[in-house]
Image: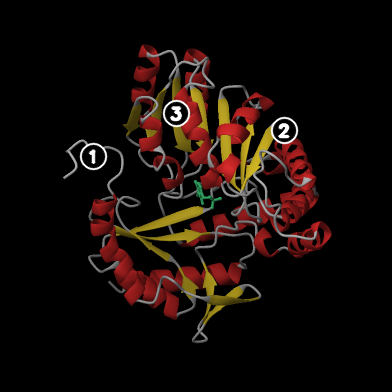
Amino acid sequence: MPDKQKNIYTNNLKVAKYGNKAWQKAQDMGLIDLGVIRKRNKLITKDCHEFINMANFSYLGLDTHPKIVQGAAEQVLKSGSLDQPTARLRIHLSDIDDAEKALSELFEGFVLTASTCSALSEGVLPLIASGVFTDNQKPIMIFDRFCHFSMSITKPICADETDIITVPHNDLEQVEDICKKNKYVVYVADGAYSTGGSCPMPELLKLQEKYGLYLYIDDSHSISTLGKNGFGYARSHLNEINERTFFVNSMSKGFGCSGGMLLTGTPNYQDFIKRFGGPIAWSHPINSAGIGGILASVKIHFSEELVILQKALQKNLNFFDSLIKTNQLGSQIPIRIMELESKEDPSIIARKIFDKGFYVAPVSFPVVPKGKIGLRMMIRSNLTLDEIKQCCEIINGTVNHY
Ligand SMILES: *Cc1c(COP(=O)(O)O)cnc(C)c1O
């Protein structure tokens, strides 16, 4: 038998035991594993149920933008293959350099891409933990308790390199205490959380200024949706990115493509990451379709169209907020979670709403407090006011029934 030192940072047996009931219920209700086809702004299931997806992360509707789709298709034909089957470290299609140059200009920093954002965190966080970017001194790694799975899954690997501390959500007092006692400290968090809300960026930058705190911020949920050129929530707080800040983003959400990007204020980290960053070195890079999509999406981001889409998103968010009050009321980040007292299973409520034409995601602890359940909605620019009104009426009608 393994000794009791196991499961310090992860416990899949416990997660599966605890979480599987809810997934099974969602499966029984026909709410997960849905194979669909697209029909304009709607989706259709195999048994011909038509619905609007309120769990779609493509906040600006760029996932179906004709120029991005066309850019992806043309790039595949132009390069003559989907992938360059050699480790990126050795040989890669020069189109990747073009895409990274374009992304670097757009986000005003230095961009390194990878097949996914998860692959980036898996590659970069253990390297940061090793001390290779902090004068060869091991930093203390602080993880926000709510930080995304793609980062928290690296805790055991990072813990093999250095000390790991998990702090309560947004608890900067603890972060400051640790900064007072240690020269090299890295704080790992989301910019915008899929559980609602954001990291306190201004306060984190103050800690950075005072103590030299390093920041590793995953802002997948807000890039494109906010700020100049689609900088997103966290990046918008800095004019120039300093050398102690790492941003990572998934490009398969607001940006409308696929792949992940690391954004830093210096190119100096890149060689190490390309050589020693696990999946970044040894897995395939973004494929030709992804590169074509990125080049097209960057052009849209530089154009007036981005501003129009961002404004349409904020208008839809304001309209949603006027119909349903959530803890995220007034936030520019497009995630809304409606907390419910109901003792009913959230999957049963979500199924009733689904039957009336809208897919909302049922959520439970820890996304909402213990003893409560909730419904999570993602607002997009490409929803009409009528669709939002209809959705909110159905939600309110279904929920008030209990
Ligand atoms: C969706 C998401 C990811 C995963 O992105 P991939 O590119 O699919 O790996 C990572 N981090 C956060 C915060 C996300 O919301």
The residue wearing badge 3 is 187
Q: Is mark 1 within 8 Å of ligand 1?
A: no
Along the horizontal axis of the image, is 341 left or right of 30? Answer: left
Tell me if residue 382 comes above or below residue 188 in the rendering.
below
**CA distance for labels 2 and 3:** 22 Å
**CA distance for labels 2 and 1:** 43 Å
Q: Which residue is outermost to the right?
A: 78
The residue wearing badge 2 is 108
Q: Is there a contact, CB below 8 Å, between mark 2 and mark 3?
A: no
Which of the 4 image quarters holds residue 252?
bottom right
Tell me if residue 236 comes above or below residue 18 in the rendering.
above
At x 62%, y 55%, the residue is 313
Mark positioned earlier in the residue sequence (1 or 3): 1
The residue wearing badge 1 is 6
Relative image position of residue 319 (x, y in whole percent): 55, 59
Which of the 4 image quarters holds residue 138?
top left
Q: Is mark 3 within 8 Å of ligand 1?
A: no
Relative image position of residue 42 (x, y in whole percent): 59, 75
